[in-house]
Amino acid sequence: MCLSIVKMITPVGEETLGEYVSSLQASGESVEFTDIMGSTISVYGTIKNIDLINNIITISPPVE
């Protein structure tokens, strides 16, 4: 089973938003992801990178 970690780029580095993420849906400037326990988190931003080897999804904040 491949589960991922979702991180957000911040001015001071990267912040982990979720672990054991099983699904992700991006729409415009919103990204919604669900972990294996069924908890859903929605954040404003866009997908910057998906690292399939290390199972890390990086999200950039929206441009203002």
Image: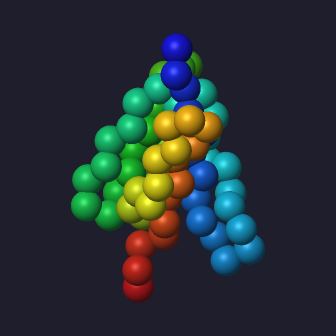
Q: Tell me if I can see residue 38 in this picture.
A: yes
Q: State which quarter of the image contains the C terminus.
A: bottom left
Q: Is residue 3 left or right of residue 26?
A: right
Q: Residue at x 46, y 32 (%)?
A: 34
- Residue nearest the viewer, comparing 6 with 34: 6
Q: Position of residue 50 (x, y in %)?
A: 46, 47
Q: Position of residue 41 (x, y in %)?
A: 48, 42
Q: Is residue 55 above or below residue 29?
A: above
Q: Residue at x 74, y 74 (%)?
A: 12
Q: Is residue 18 left or right of residue 26?
A: right
Q: Residue at x 31, y 49 (%)?
A: 26
Colouring: rainbow
Q: Is residue 28 left or right of residue 45?
A: left
Which of the 4 quarters of the picture holds residue 8? bottom right
Q: Is residue 13 above or below residue 58?
A: below
Q: Tell me if I can see residue 44 in this picture.
A: no
Residue sticking out furthest to the top: 1
Q: Position of residue 35 (x, y in %)?
A: 52, 28
Residue sticking out furthest to the right: 12
Residue sticking out furthest to the left: 28
- Residue nearest the viewer, comparing 61 with 41: 61
Q: Is residue 14 above or below residue 24?
A: below
